[in-house]
Amino acid sequence: GQQVMQIPQYQHVQEGEDFTTYCNSSTTLSNIQWYKQRPGGHPVFLIQLVKSGEVKKQKRLTFQFGEAKKNSSLHITATQTTDVGTYFCAGLPSGGTYKYIFGTGTRLKVLA
Amino acid sequence: EAGVAQSPRYKIIEKRQSVAFWCNPISGHATLYWYQQILGQGPKLLIQFQNNGVVDDSQLPKDRFSAERLKGVDSTLKIQPAKLEDSAVYLCASSLGRGIGNTIYFGEGSWLTVV
């Protein structure tokens, strides 16, 4: 079946260090969304990428969609303690399906 | 704008008992989702409604799980009988429509513990 994997599964960084999580799909995607889930909370939408090679920025967060539309990345520059949480990508497979497949998630811990 | 409302927030039941969760999506949202999130994993789609019709229930364990969205607004998810492996957070979510461009808004979740 269609799968979306994320690496790494866990990441501990010192405050101020950079962080990157990678999302890889087994199939081509129409688009990809990123969500953040704080500990004990629910997933909250961050951004959507649609075009091949697209790059979007939100303050210290940079999102990229691969040229082949099968992978994506989220990079956080100079992490802060408020960045703590699990980051999920959710891909919409090409071909008419309307079902987003969530990735396995990357749990980020930021040490002050 | 009010968010997705869910109840109850927490439930502890014994195995083989039944439980029901309720969801009220954001007003005007045609698409409603129920996800199961086991601790440490990503949300897994159980069922997706478009208005009051089911568009995907391929991962719903139909021998014990059922869901309905009467009148295309509120929805209930029922588990009967519950198993230990059903312990998870059940997230209801909604979006304006399906597909590209539609943001999925999640509720706070209903935390289920089966003992």
Image (cartoon, coloured by chain):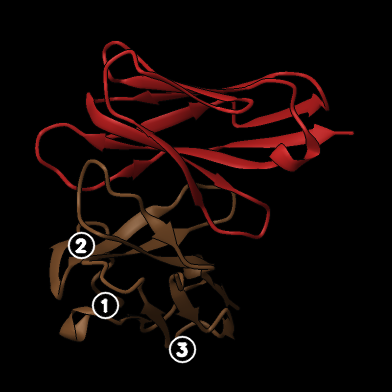
Amino acid under disc 1: Ala
Q: Chain of mark 2?
A: B
Which label lies toward us, 3 or 2? 2
Q: Is residue A104 visible?
A: no
The hue used for chain A is red
Mark positioned earlier in the residue sequence (3 or 1): 3
User: Where, quadrant-wise, is the C terminus of chain B in this rendering?
Assistant: bottom right
Distance in Å between CA atoms under marks 2 and 1: 9 Å
Q: Chain of mark 3?
A: B
Residue visible at 26% across and 57% down in the picture: B59
Tell me where residue B11 appears, x and y as whole percent: 57, 82
Tell me where residue A39 appears, x and y as whole percent: 68, 53
Residue B57 is marked as 2
Amino acid under disc 3: Gln
Q: Circle 3 sits on which residue? A: B17
Position above or below: B105 against A68? below
| Residue A13, image quadrant | top right
Residue visible at 83% across and 27% down in the picture: A15
Circles 3, 1 touching at the beta carbon (< 8 Å): no
Dot 3 crowding, Cα within 10 Å, few <14, some 14–19, many 20+: few
Position above or below: B82 against A62? below
User: Where, quadrant-wise, is the N terminus of chain B in this rendering?
Assistant: bottom left
Residue visible at 35% across and 73% down in the picture: B25
Taking depth in this image into account, of B63 and A54 the one nearest to the observer is A54
Amino acid under disc 2: Asp
Distance in Å between CA atoms under marks 3 and 1: 17 Å
In this picture, residue A32 sits left or right of residue A103: left
Mark positioned earlier in the residue sequence (2 or 1): 2
Q: Circle 1 sits on which residue? A: B67
